[in-house]
Structures are given as C-alpha cells and as structure tokens.
Image (spheres, rainbow, N blue to C red):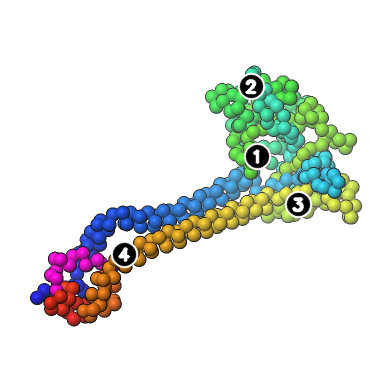
Amino acid sequence: MNNYHPHSVPTTEILSIAIAALWSNKLRTLLTMLGVIIGIASVIAITSVGQGVQKATEQEIQSLGTNVLQIFPGQARTGGISQGLGSTSTLIKEDAQVIQKQVPSAQVVSAYLQRPGQIVYQQDNHGTNIVGIDVNYPEARNTQLIQGRFFTQEEMDNATPVTILGNTVLNELFGEEVQPLGEKIRIEGNIYEIIGVFEKKGSEGSIDRDDQVFIPLSNMSSRIFGNNSLSGTAVNGIYVKVIDEERMEEAEFQITNLLRLRHNLSPSQDDDFSIRNQTDVVNTFTNIVGLLTVMVAAIAGISLVVGGIGIANIMLVSVVERTREIGIRKAVGATDSAILKQFFSRISLDFSNRGSDWYGYGNCHCFSCS
C-alpha cells in the first residue's frame, strides 16, 4: 500500500510540478503570459504617457508665467458674424503705458504688434511671424536671451533696424553652428542687423513660439506695417505681468475699468477688448489633457478585459481537458476543496511516481479516505 498523502506535499515540490506543467504546454503558457503582460503594460504605458503630456503642457504654459494677463483688441463683425479677437484695432501702445502707471497690481506691462512676413538671408528665405516689441517684453513673457543683447531704449525711440531671432528662425537660416550676431537679414525688404537670439520656448498649441523675429515696436509700426491710428500706435495685444498670482482678479477688474474709461465706453456698451487669464488657460489645458488620459485609459482597460477573457478561455480549456480526471476523483470520495488544491498544484502530473492506487484503483488513498 502506498502511504502517500497529498496534503503533505512540500511547497517546493508543488512549485516544481507547476513549472513542469507550464513547460509541457509552452504555446498555451506563452499566449497566456502575453495576454497578461501586454494588457497590464498597455494600461501602465498609456497612463504614464497621459500624465507626461499633462505635465509637459503645464510646464510649457507656466513657462510663460501663470501671473500674466493678455489683453486683446475687440472683434469686428461682418453681417452679424464675428471675425474673431484682434480683427479690429482698439488697443494702442499708450493703453499699455497708462496701465503701467495707474494699475497698482501691474508689475510689468508690454505691448506688441505682429504680422506674418518674409525674411531673407543671402539665398535663403523663410516665412515667419514678425513681432514688434518694447523693452518690457522679456520680463513680461519670462524669456531670456541665449546670445547677444536686447534692444536699448535709444534703439526703441529711434526705430533702429535691429532684430532678435527665435530659435526656429536661427536654425532655418543659419543652422546650429553658425554665429548670427552682426549678420544682416532682410525683413519685408528692409535690412536689419541681428543683435541677439531668444532661448527656445517650444510650441503653444499649434503655434511655434520660436518661429518669430523680433524688432522694435516703433520700427514695426513705422517701417513694416505702418499700423498707426489717430489716437496712437495700434497694437495687437498687451501683456500684463501681475505682482502676485493671487491678485489676478483684482488686476483684471482694474484694467477693465481703466480701458473702458479710456475708450469712452458707456455702461450699455460692451467691452471693445478682451482679457485672458493665463491661470485659466493652464487649468483648461490640464482638465482637457486629464479627460483625454481618462478616456484612453478606459480604452486600455477595455482591451485588458478582452485579454482577460482570452486568458479565462484558455483556463477553461485546461479545466475541460481534465473533466474525466476530476470525475474519477469525485467518484472515489475526494472533496471539492481537496480537488481544487490538487488541481492548482498539478499533482496529477506526478501520479505515476506515487502508484496507480492514488487514483482510487485498488486500495483507496484519496483525500477523504486516506
């Protein structure tokens, strides 16, 4: 009689038998492992990518400063249809100067004027965005020079033809190894001397913030586009860097009242300008990216469920293949818990070493009778 008792099987032996079972069914084991690995890896990867995009987006926007307000001109209407912000000139450079003087919460104010245009260096030309700026621009936009210097106040006052390149323009015209300082380029047919290069700022949505050339605002309005109004130098927008992020609403309220007074708007008239809070932009992008991450993770979760169903199908096949074996054990008196334990440990693979009476043939040595 064989006195073998399955409850006394060491854990190491159970593991070795389980490994032998996996090895004897290589294809089935591989498919099951792939289902688990790919499913879990896809969820982790998608979630990580979503969080990475969200963090990168926040950093890109925050690099512009979360305590910055942007003021845009009003919008023209044609046939009752709005033409979009900035479609009419309602802001002037003098508005920025008054905001700097009369709004206590405004730390730095900078006006700008921009238009698309062509620049030429020797035989190369490049379509880019030409931006006229004032001396407060670097601080208001939280940007630094990596080469050269910024415009002086004298160059601003005299509309001197000097320019600063964005990183994309630098690479397009000169490449990464050429020193551009002191070189001359043509901007809309006028010759300008390169005196500096701005640091790389990346993209803001679909807009490449490095694909720009910068010239003095006075030069832009007088020589490039002549965008002057009867009341002053018309601009496309004004940046206002607020002293503290907590005072953004206060600054927005003060600027709104001041501009309405300057533009002679009655209480019944709508604002002829628009103010955008940079903090709101950060929150909006964060929420959008967060929702996209959840959506993609849900899709990955569905894929994981489908993979789990495939794994369950393989396991069901394994159980069905052993139905006869389980039936024999039940017939000789084995309990459900004992069969379940033996089923998972795959002791049956080693039954030939234990004697044929282990199955119940001859003397019964099943779980319940032994």
Earlier residue among tags 2 and 1: 2
Viewer-closest of 347 and 280? 347
Which residue in the structure is indicated by mark 3? 252
Tag 4–tag 1 contact (CB < 8 Å) = no
Earlier residue among tags 4 and 1: 1
Cα distance between the residues tagged 2 and 1: 22 Å
Q: Is residue 108 above or below residue 152?
A: below
- What percent of the width, then of the height, locates residue 189? 74, 22
Q: Is residue 257 magenta?
A: no
Q: Is residue 331 above or below residue 32?
A: below
**Res. 290 in view:** no
Viewer-closest of 284 and 253? 284
- Mark 4 vs mark 2, foreground winner is 4
User: Residue 310's image quarter?
Assistant: bottom left
Name the secondary structure under disc 4.
helix
| Circle on res. 207 | 1
- At x 73%, y 39%, the residue is 110
Q: Amino acid at mark 1?
A: Ile
- Mark 2 vs mark 3, foreground winner is 2
Earlier residue among tags 2 and 3: 2
The quadrant the N terminus occupies is bottom left
Q: Report the span colored magenta.
A: 344-357
Cα distance between the residues tagged 2 and 3: 44 Å
Cα distance between the residues tagged 4 and 1: 57 Å
- At x 27%, y 68%, the residue is 322
Q: Amino acid at mark 2?
A: Asp
Viewer-closest of 194 and 173? 173
Q: Is residue 352 magenta?
A: yes
- Mark 4 vs mark 1, foreground winner is 4
Which residue in the structure is indicated by mark 2? 124
Which residue in the structure is indicated by mark 4? 318
